[in-house]
Image (cartoon, rainbow, N blue to C red):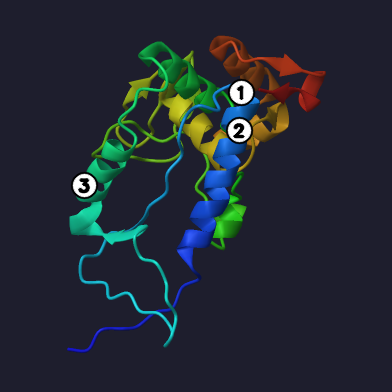
């Protein structure tokens, strides 16, 4: 059976760009002694890499699955000299994490969905039920389908909201999303969760 043939832009160009950015970041943060190497890795061992006729491309920085560890060992041998101690490496790791900024993604737009496609409300935590929405009564969330009760089932639903829509919500948005019966009930929910709020009345922003 014949396989498919795909063409890609030269991934080494992207590697070189990332290498340059990382080097600049290290220098900016006083870590310019660290070497930065690159390697393009293709997961599939059955991939066949081709170039245009007459192209004298250097594939020394490109490898497939079975060669990955050999290439890493070669890198370690080339950079065997210790440039920084373990504590410094730990600090660099923490600094990288603290300055990391995930790319914002509009999930609904990404998957061509609208708010009408999302089932709102608190989901029953019983895996055999998963009914939506649960009802809030006397400080607990009650499933009208199986009668399961929970005080913290709301947490998962809130995390879904913040992931799908935005990182804040108004009291009115919270009330509508959780199918709460009144503004007073919404206020009780906000108070019980000890959520940070700004603004007044229904235009509260919940963080």
Mark 1 vs mark 2, CA separation in Å? 6 Å
**Disc 1 target residue:** 29
Q: Residue at x 59, y 48 (%)?
A: 105
* Dot 3 and dot 1 residues touching (CB under 8 Å): no
Count residues near mark 2 (Cα–Cα under 10 Å), then give few for <14, some for 14-19, many for 20+: some
Residue 102 placement: quadrant: top right
In the rendered image, residue 139, in percent from the top left (x then y), is placed at 48, 13
Q: Is residue 142 above or below residue 71?
A: above
Q: Residue at x 35, y 65 (%)?
A: 59
Report helix, strand or loop for mark 1: loop
In the rendered image, residue 108, in percent from the top left (x then y), is placed at 57, 54
Would you say 1 lies left or right of 184 here? left
Q: Is residue 173 above or below residue 82?
A: below
Q: Residue at x 21, y 47 (%)?
A: 69
Which residue occupies the foreground of this view, 39 or 148? Answer: 39
Looking at the figure, which quarter contains the C terminus? top right
**Disc 3 target residue:** 69
In the rendered image, residue 104, in percent from the top left (x then y), is placed at 61, 44
Which mark sits nearer the N-terminus, 3 or 1? 1
């Amino acid at each position: 059976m014949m396989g498919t043939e795909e063409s890609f832009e030269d991934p080494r160009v992207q590697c070189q760009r990332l290498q340059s950015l990382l080097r600049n970041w290290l220098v900016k943060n006083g870590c310019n002694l660290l070497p930065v190497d690159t390697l393009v890795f293709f997961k599939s061992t059955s991939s066949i890499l081709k170039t245009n006729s007459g192209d004298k491309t250097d594939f020394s920085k490109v490898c497939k699955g079975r060669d990955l560890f050999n290439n890493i060992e070669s890198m370690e041998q080339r950079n065997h000299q210790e440039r920084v101690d373990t504590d410094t490496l730990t600090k660099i790791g923490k600094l990288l994490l603290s300055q990391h900024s995930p790319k914002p993604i509009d999930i609904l737009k990404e998957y061509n969905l609208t708010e009408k496609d999302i089932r709102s409300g608190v989901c029953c935590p019983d895996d055999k039920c998963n009914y939506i929405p649960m009802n809030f009564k006397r400080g607990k969330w009650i499933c009208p389908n199986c009668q399961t009760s929970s005080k913290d089932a709301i947490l998962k639903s809130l995390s879904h909201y913040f992931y799908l829509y935005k990182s804040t919500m108004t009291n009115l948005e919270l009330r509508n999303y959780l199918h709460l019966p009144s503004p007073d009930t919404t206020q009780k929910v906000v108070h019980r969760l000890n959520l940070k709020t700004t603004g007044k009345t229904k235009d509260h922003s919940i963080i």
